[in-house]
Image (cartoon, rainbow, N blue to C red):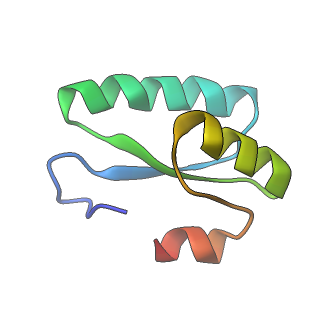
Amino acid sequence: MSSLLSPNPGCLLVGCGVVGQVHAHALAELAQSGHGHLAGVMDIDYAKAQAFGRQWGVPATASLDEAISW
C-alpha cells in the first residue's frame, strides 16, 4: 500500500458488504483526482473478499494482519 504521505495514498477497505461497494465507488472517484485509491480489501468471509477483490482488481484477504502488511 502507498504511504499516507503519497499524493495518491492507497486505502484498505475493511468489510466487503453493501456499504463496502459504496466506499469502493467513492475511492474510485478519489483516484481520478489523485487523492486516494482502493489498494486492497479485507473481509472475515474470505470468499466475499476474493470476489470483491476480483471485481475491483485489488488484492484480497481475510486477515487484517496480512492486509496491513501490504
Q: Is residue 69 shown left or right of residue 21?
A: left
Quadrant of the rendering where the N terminus is positioned: bottom left
**Can you see residue 45?**
no
Asked if residue 39 can be seen in this view, the reply is yes
The picture places residue 35, in percent across and down from the top left corner, at 23, 37
Residue 55 vertical position relative to residue 53 in the rendered view, above or below? above
Which of 43 and 53 lies nearest the eye of the viewer?
Answer: 53
Q: How many marks?
A: 0
Looking at the image, residue 34 sits to the left or right of residue 62; the answer is: left
Q: Residue at position x 74%, y 26% from top?
A: 18
Question: In the image, is residue 64 above or below residue 15?
Answer: below
Residue 1 sits above or below residue 18 on the image: below
Which image quadrant is residue 52 in?
A: top right
Picture residue at 40% right of the left edge, 28% below the top: 28
Give the vertical position of 15 relative to 64 (above or below).
Answer: above
Image coordinates of residue 17 in percent, x first then y, are 76, 34
Look at 74% across and 63% down and name the residue there.
Answer: 62
Relative to 25, 6 lies left or right? left
Q: What residue do we see at 30% from left, 41% from top? A: 36
Query: Could you say which quadrant of the image residue 65 lies in?
Result: bottom right
Residue 64 x %, y %: 65, 69
The image position of residue 51, as x and y in percent, is 73, 41
